Amino acid sequence: MKKVLLLCFAFVNIYWLNAQTDIDALRYSTTQNWGTARNIGTGGIFGTIGGDMSCMSSNPAGLARFTSNEFTISPAFIFGNNNVDYFNNKTSDNKFNVGLAGFGAVISPSKLEGKASFGIALNKQANFNESIFISGYNNRNSILESYADKIQGFDVNAAESNYPFDASLAFLSELITVDTPTGLNYTSIVKNGNIEQQMTIERKGGIDELAISGSGRINDKLYVGATFGLPLVNYTENYLYREIDINDSTALFNSFTQENYLNTDGIGFNLKMGFLAIPHKNIRLSVAFHTPTLLRLSDSYINILNSDFTTFTFDAESPEGAFDYKVVTPWKLQTGASFVHPNFGLIGIEYELSNPSKAKFKFDDNDPSSKILEADLNQNIAQKYDWSQTIKVGLESKWKNMRFRAGMQAQSSPFSDVFKPKTDKNFNFLYSGGLGYKGKKFSIDAAYARGKQTSTFVPYSRNSDTPIAAIESIQQNITISVGYKF
């Protein structure tokens, strides 16, 4: 066994700038207001209803509808399933995790006689936990051919060091050969594919927002509120890529495995401002604006490659990389209307508008190469994405102390027409329902939500012969909220 450790830190930052992609910008720009089981069960419409803890992360004006102090905690049980089609081979993988949809407290000081309320909560904004398994027989090409393309024209020393996280690892592991002593012409040992390709993607983490809110009643017909938000980001990805010569198509070669590890942590800030109007005792109208979120993120990463030949093996390891940068996510506008009856329940609709094409990377490094890459990334984001719309509809009925809920969300594709994947639908739907009990001091609610969406995964690019995996993701969650008035 031979082991190679790449010690070429001069190239780490430049390479990792290429590792930031438009998908990362979309990941941190796509958030949802989870909050309480009551909000989830009605499709997320409580920004236009008010009186719920989730208002802090949607429309903080609704916080002033609280008339007493209240604490709420909402554990969530999340089930994810991914079905994949890759070269007509279908695979499936599941993921289960337990977390918090949110918890917090609202204070409505009695001295203010219901004219103002204040709150602090930690609300989940995004869940990244998922497991994907992709497998198929590729009779066209290998990822090693894309690696060979990367180092074409370099001398041997440059080929060994310029791409320490992928192509250079493959070259040092004898998976790419050179036909001249000085280099310049490189060839993959696997030609024209005929290999089994397997990919395992394990993702963990999410975005939880610390919301500090205040809301006041101007009069009986108009409420205003604001939230200072501190999104907390944690994202971990383990990506295992493997090629196996199951038909002995390449002499002496058995397989190789490349494992990529990435961890991203960060914090950001934003401001949310909202209004809630009650022109009639049964009618509520709302509007809220969320400023762009500035996220400061830190990546740490390392890649390992193992090659297995008939008579020997290689282990190659990249340096441990680190990179700090900023992401600015787009603004968001929410508006809605609802009908509330004190005896029968409520029904509401909300409309949400955002533009992922306005997301931007900002690199701290002022090196000219970094700035060029930053500009290219932001141009790609601007071209690839377009307006994103979400329509939410929900209702709640009452019978004595019991509550019965149903809701739906329809979210449009964030991709522009030119870049929209063939499997991507115009709208992805999320359906929800729930029930609850509300007493004088104590309340308990439960909600179930189920959503489905389609996406594609591209392991590498080979011009017109790029392999593409079609993914259908189904996510279900059960949330239970327990509230206590004090």
Image: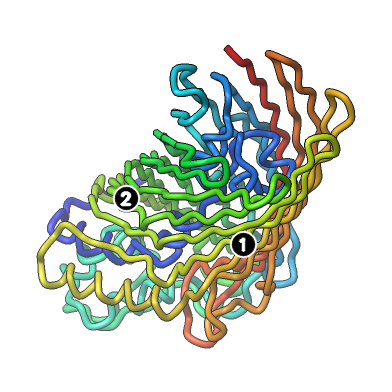
Q: Where is residue 437 drawn, in percent x and y?
A: 79, 23
Query: Is residue 444 something one can see in this rendering?
Result: yes
In terms of depth relative to the viewer, which is nearer, 235 or 161?
235
Q: Amino acid at mark 1?
A: Tyr
Q: Which one is closest to the eye, mark 1 or mark 2?
A: 1
Residue ID at (20%, 64%): 14
Task: Establish if 82 lies above or below 245.
Answer: above
Tell me: residue 280, above or below residue 428.
above
Q: Secondary structure at mark 1?
A: strand
Q: Quadrant of residue 229?
A: top left
Q: Secondary structure at mark 2?
A: strand
Question: Looking at the image, is mark 1 or mark 2 earlier in the sequence?
Answer: 2
Q: Is residue 315 visible?
A: no
Give me the residue at 53% from left, 80% from top. 416
Quarter of the figure that contains the C terminus = top right
> Seen from this angle, which residue lies furthest right?
399
Residue type, mark 2 in image = Leu
Residue 66 at x, y = what percent? Answer: 57, 29
Horizontally, residue 136 falls left or right of residue 264, namely: right
Q: Which mark is residue 295?
A: 2
Q: Dot 1 surroundings within 10 Å: few (below 14), some, or many (20 or more)?
A: some
Alpha carbon distance from label 1 to label 2: 25 Å
Q: Which residue is mark 1?
A: 351
Q: Quadrant of residue 25?
A: bottom left
Q: How is the image coloured?
A: rainbow
Side of 433 relative to 317 (left or right): right
Residue drawn at (74%, 71%) of the image = 88
Q: Which quadrant of the figure contains the N terminus?
A: top left
Question: Tag 2: Cα neighbours inside 10 Å, few (<14), some, or many (≥20)?
Answer: many
Q: Nearer the viewer, residue 478 or 93?
A: 478
> Which residue is painted at 15% across and 53% down in the image?
9
Residue 439, relative to residue 277: is it above or below?
above
